[in-house]
Image: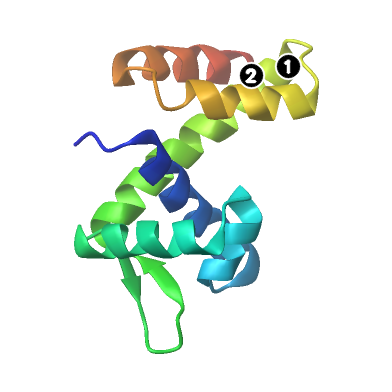
Amino acid sequence: MKIQESAEDYLESILIIGEQKGHVRAIDIVNHLGISKPSVSVYLKNLRENGYVNINEKGHLSLTETGLVIAEKIYERHKILSAMLISLGVSKETAMKDACKIEHDLSDETFNAIKEHYKAYE
């Protein structure tokens, strides 16, 4: 299943914020991604309607099973790619930014090869 890069970023953000804070609200995504509140509201509505996110009566967001699978996949890519770049001598700030760009475009085959190679040298 292929979804837009921005959707992957939203789902990954919900996963990360949820791990850090225990709950996620729209304003948390606004702050995390640096996007306007109206834009986040519209995008969250689309994610909810497409079955990736649930919003409860308190306004807390959670990932559906489908959303969680995508978020975990992107987050794993981000963590491994940024760690690999840092191990190559790239500054943490640059590695994090570059990993965010790369994580969306790699095929599963390429990422799995990178992951296995990286794990062999950890």
* Mark identifier at residue 110: none
Q: Which residue is located at x 31 percent, y 54 percent?
A: 67
* Mark identifier at residue 84: 2
Going by the numbered disc 2, the residue's amino acid type is Met
Dot 2 falls on a residue whose secondary structure is: helix
Residue 68: quarter of image: bottom left
Which residue is tagged 1?
Answer: 87
Dot 1 falls on a residue whose secondary structure is: helix
Residue 7: quarter of image: top left
Within 10 Å of disc 2 (Cα), the crowding (few <14, some 14-19, many 20+) is: many
Within 10 Å of disc 1 (Cα), the crowding (few <14, some 14-19, many 20+) is: some
Residue 46: quarter of image: bottom left
Please provide percent x and percent y for residue 29: 55, 59
Please provide percent x and percent y for residue 90: 76, 15
Q: Which residue is located at x 56 percent, y 16 percent?
A: 118
Going by the numbered disc 1, the residue's amino acid type is Ser
47 on left or right of 35: left
Quadrant of the rendering where the N terminus is positioned: top left
Quadrant of the rendering where the C terminus is positioned: top right
Q: Which residue is located at x 77 percent, y 29 percent?
A: 93
Residues 8 and 18: in front is 8
Q: Which residue is located at x 41 percent, y 27 percent?
A: 104
Position above or below: 26 against 98? below
From where the camera sits, is residue 19 visible? no
Position above or below: 41 against 1? below
For the residues labelled 1 and 2, say whether their Cβ atoms are less than 8 Å apart.
yes
Position above or below: 70 against 89? below
Please provide percent x and percent y for residue 116: 46, 17
Please provide percent x and percent y for residue 15: 49, 56
